[in-house]
Amino acid sequence: MSTETTASVSTHILDTSVGRPAEGVAVSLAARSGRDADWQALGGSAADADGRCKDLPALPEGTTHVRLDFAVEAYFLKSEKKQADAQQDAPANRDSGSVGAFFPEVAITFAVVPGEHFHVPLLLNPFGYSVYRGS
C-alpha cells in the first residue's frame, strides 16, 4: 500500500493516423482540490520522440481533480506540412476543407485519489481522439 499523500499523473500521445508517437504536442496540467474549487495551473511539458511527457509537474497535496490540456492543432499543422512535402503532388488526405485538426485542443478532466498513479494516454487522429486510464 502506498504511503504517498498525493496522486501522480503521466501521459503519452499516439497518433493513430500514422501509427506513431505524437512528438512535440504541448500538454498543460491543472489541478483542483474539490469539485467546486478553482483550477490551479501547474505547468506543462511536451511529448518527446516516444510521445511521452516525462516532466509533468507534481500535484499538490489535496488534489481531487486533474485536467490535461493537449494543444494538438500545431502538431497536425506540422504533420500535414511534412506529409505534403513527402507526397508533393498527392492530394491531402482530408474529407473537409479544414486545415489542421477538427479538434484543435483536447481537454481531459478526471478524478484522482491520494497515493495512486494515473496514466492517461491520448490516442489521436485529425478527426477524433480516445483516452483511457492506462497502467
Image (cartoon, rainbow, N blue to C red):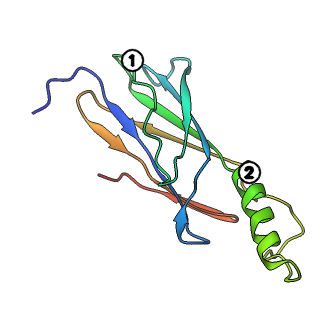
Is residue 72 toward the left or the right of residue 135 in the image?
A: right
Cα separation between marks 2 and 1:
29 Å
Quarter of the figure with residue 87 = bottom right
Q: Secondary structure at mark 1?
A: loop
Q: Could you tell me the amino acid type at mark 1?
A: Pro
In the rendered view, tell whether residue 90 sits above or below residue 81.
below
In the rendered view, tell whether residue 97 sits above or below residue 134.
below
Is residue 69 toward the left or the right of residue 97 in the image?
A: left
Nearer-the-camera pick, 55 or 114: 55
User: Which residue, given by chain and number where applicable, does mark 1 sit on?
Assistant: 60
Is residue 9 toward the left or the right of residue 19 in the image?
A: left
Q: Nearer the viewer, mark 2 or mark 1?
A: 2
Q: Residue furthest bottom?
A: 90
Residue at the spot x=51%, y=20% of the render? Answer: 36
Quarter of the figure with residue 5 = top left
Query: Where residue 3 appears, x then y in whole percent?
Result: 14, 24
Residue at the spot x=14%, y=30% of the render? Answer: 2
Query: Where residue 69 appears, x then y in whole percent?
Result: 59, 39
Q: Quadrant of the N terminus?
A: top left
User: Which residue, given by chain and number where applicable, does mark 2 sit on?
Assistant: 73
Query: Where residue 35 appears, x then y in whole percent?
Result: 47, 25
Residues packed near mark 2 inside 10 Å, few (<14), some (14 to 19) or many (20 plus): many
Q: Could you tell me the amino acid type at mark 2?
A: Glu
Q: Secondary structure at mark 2?
A: helix
Query: Where residue 109 appears, x then y in whole percent?
Result: 51, 39
Q: Who comes first in sequence, dot 2 or dot 1?
A: 1
